[in-house]
Image (spheres, coloured by chain):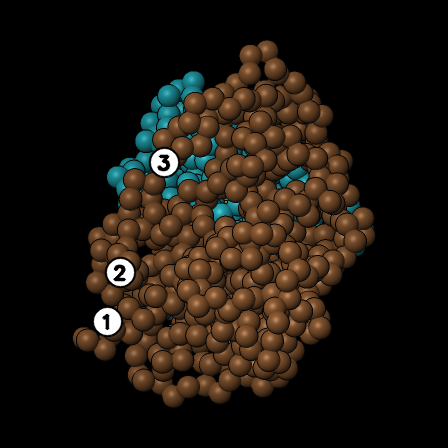
Amino acid sequence: MFKIVKKESLNPTVTRMWIEAPRVAKKAQAGQFIILRVDEQGERMPLTVADCDPTAGTVSVIFQIVGATTQKLNALNEGDCLQDFVGPLGRATETEGLKKVAVVGGGVGCAIAYPVAKKLYGQGCEVHAIVGFRNRDLVILEEAFRAVSHRYELMSDDGSAGKKGLVTDALKALIESGEQYDEVIAIGPLIMMKFVSALTKEYGIKTIVSMNPVMIDGTGMCGGCRLSVGGEVKFACVDGPEFDGHLVDFDEAMERAAMYRDTERHAYEDTCNLLKKGDEAHG
Amino acid sequence: MANMSPKKAVMPHQPAEVRNKNFDEVALGYTAQIAKEEAERCLDCRHKPCVDGCPVRIDIPRFIKQIREGDEERAYRILSLSTSLPAVCGRVCPQESQCEQRCVRGLKGEPVAIGRLERYVADRHNEKAKVWPDPIASNGHKVAIIGSGPSGLSCAGDLARMGYEVTIFEALHTPGGVLVYGIPEFRLPKAIVEKEIKGLTALGVKIETNSVVGKLISVDELFEEGFEAVYIATGAGLPRFMNIPGENLKGVYSANEFLTRINLMKAYLPDSDTPLRPAKHVAVVGGGNVAMDAARCAKRLGAEVTVVYRRGLEEMPARKEEIDHAMEEGIVFKTLCNPTEILGDEHKNVMGMTCVEMELGQPDESGRRRPVVKEGSEFTLEVDAVIMSIGTSPNPLIRTTTPGLDTDRRGCIITDRRGQTSREGVFAGGDAVSGAATVILAMGAGKTAAAAIHEYIQSK
Ligand SMILES: Cc1cc2nc3c(=O)[nH]c(=O)nc-3n(C[C@H](O)[C@H](O)[C@H](O)COP(=O)(O)OP(=O)(O)OC[C@H]3O[C@@H](n4cnc5c(N)ncnc54)[C@H](O)[C@@H]3O)c2cc1C
Ligand code: FES
């Protein structure tokens, strides 16, 4: 059993938890993920490692309440335990040699982008963070991001926080103004990563995206997490979760992400009506 | 006087039209009366051909003799000399190509039902055995085992009984390997596997679930933590796909995924959170045990099921009993048939599968006649789900994180006959070495390695 030592609400639909898992905390690196099960009947759910504290032996995860399982997870409190917690899984973000990077985060994807930005910043890389949310109530990790970036561009759909517009608008403006990035790392909704990749392709800037498809085991055993990358089949859990954004077939990934949506939605709506706006397809 | 009936005593079964709607065990097991009758069919041959057919050389005539004499506990002890999982193997071994194939009674009529008798003895023992074994005093040596399938479990059991402190590291949340996530409840009730595992923990074996070796901890770090030997029993690995168009459509699964959702995650039960997509007509591609299990699960979930296999019925690698059971349960077999494309609708849901008919041509290197495409035979099966069950390739996780561990061209770990790998103190066995094989071979490899590990540590 894995104890929840801390729980905080980052916005009405996003929660952060610190979980006691000393072995995982010792090994986990930015870009990797864990799989948890809330209880004996629970499904296996992958979540990216948002941060970890090897000394305290804790790992932090940040999740948006979008379905039955995240709802169940969110019902737990400090002191409660998770049934299972396995990781770290997947490959770590490759940051070696990067001197200047634009880290683009959308919505709850910022939780995953943050440890990447932190790692880059820590190794002396110039980090430009471009983050987007639907509105000001949904902004998360603003202070955290500011602390690990040289430039912080906040965007919102309705202009209620930062500038009005999409992250692609901000990224384009920066590139047009002459900023030269070694790499763009984009993490957020599939649709956002698709458009960021399309934009950077025009400028020929290498772009890494983090994929989070349906998973079960997370060790390569089931193939449920497969995607097409450059015409080849890849298993996100072992070959990823990060891939070259210019090669990922996003349209296919979006369809596959919706594979269980009908069944899941159904289960979720049975239990709760809180979150009609928790629409994954948007940030 | 021996029972000279040319046929095996009939195994009581759930009727096909009942069982194809539930997940309860299909074969109900011999009663004492039936078991005794069947045991009377054994001629107690002096040259014991059946023993040569058994991968772990169980003294078959001797255990059967104890059934005749009504001493089932003794029969169990004889089984235990060679196998750690008789209740499992009695249910899932391909007896028709092993012990029973060599049985003299098979020359005229059916062989003795060795597998069913093995199961009978193990079940009787398990019914009675209420107390768990006491922990064995430690000899102070620690061994790590990676993977809790039949190979890891049997190696752990043997080492624990010799006094070793054994820790099994298992990636999933439940121990048992394929016995829990692959083989369905109706063929191997999970309670049997749980009981075996409880027996091991009673002996003092520690099982660390949720522990992916190669990620959480490496083989070298295991040695640093004080383990003196490591046994790698990580199984067959990653599912293969055919690389035909449409394989990433919604509704296409590997058999591993489909079976894991059902058997490990219990997605068919109302209180499980793991979803399953409903399907009306499922095609299962492949002809092994895995394909039969996937087909029979899909049937139980209410689908019409067609098994598509590129060779003939005779060439199917599945146990004969599984093929027979599948047919009785109403599963359609399209043999000499190969998929070429999976078709999808505008939302990328599966809506059909294009296949070609095959005919058998010249024998290939393996001596089996090679299937070749029949010109102009293309047709489309109307299906809304496809389950690919065409084999696996080794998981690179341990290979790539363990320097100096040699693997072959396919990626399987190379060992000598006793399980020793190219790394000192590192042993391996089961499907991770042989590629996908059988429970009995994996179990046997675990026992052999346990003996080799004991010798290695004692000689240090
Ligand atoms: C659906 C199906 C039906 C079958 N039917 C039959 C049958 O009827 N008769 C028969 O004889 N055989 C059958 N087989 C084959 C048989 O189950 C296997 O040969 C046998 O289970 C192999 O045992 P193993 O211990 O080598 O590996 P497995 O049973 O595969 O166990 C390996 C274990 O290692 C774990 N693992 C993997 N990597 C790591 C890691 N890095 N760290 C920690 N743990 C790890 C896995 O999670 C798994 O639990 C079937 C197989 C399948 C899939
Ligand atoms: S989650 Fe099963 S293979 Fe990736």
Placement of B436 over or under B89, stated as above or below: above
Dot 1 or dot 2: first in sequence order is 2
The residue under the point 28% across, 58% down is B417
Q: CA distance from mark 3 to mark 2?
A: 47 Å
Q: Residue at x 69, y 74 (%)?
A: B32
**Along the line of sight, the residue nearer the viewer: B390 or A194:** B390
Label 3 sits on a secondary structure element that is: strand
**At numbered mark 1, what does the secondary structure look like: helix, strand or loop?**
helix
Viewed as shown, does residue A82 lie left or right of B209? right
Q: Residue at x 70, y 31 (%)?
A: B384
Residue pointed to by mark 1:
B456
- Nearest to the eye among marks 3 and 1: give it: 1
What's the residue at 47%, 22% (across, down)?
Answer: B361
Residue A166 coordinates in the image, percent (x, y): 56, 30
In front of the other: A224 or A130: A224
Q: Chain of mark 3?
A: A
Marks 3 & 2 on one chain = no
- Disc 1 with disc 2 on a shared chain: yes
Q: Chain of mark 1?
A: B
Q: Position of residue B18 (x, y in %)?
A: 81, 52
Look at label 2 and name its amino acid.
Gln
Chain with colour cyan in the figure: A
**Can residue B94 be seen by looking at this rendering?**
no
Residue toward you, A97 or B419:
B419
Give the farthest residue toward the top: B376
Q: Quadrant of the image for the N terminus of chain A?
A: bottom right
- Residue A254 location, x and y as percent? 60, 32
The answer to which quarter of the image holds residue A106 is: top right
Residue B112 visible to an observer of this rendering? yes
- Badge 3 density bin: few <14, some 14–19, many ≥20, Cα 10 Å: many
Chain in brown on the image = B
Residue tagged by mark 3? A101
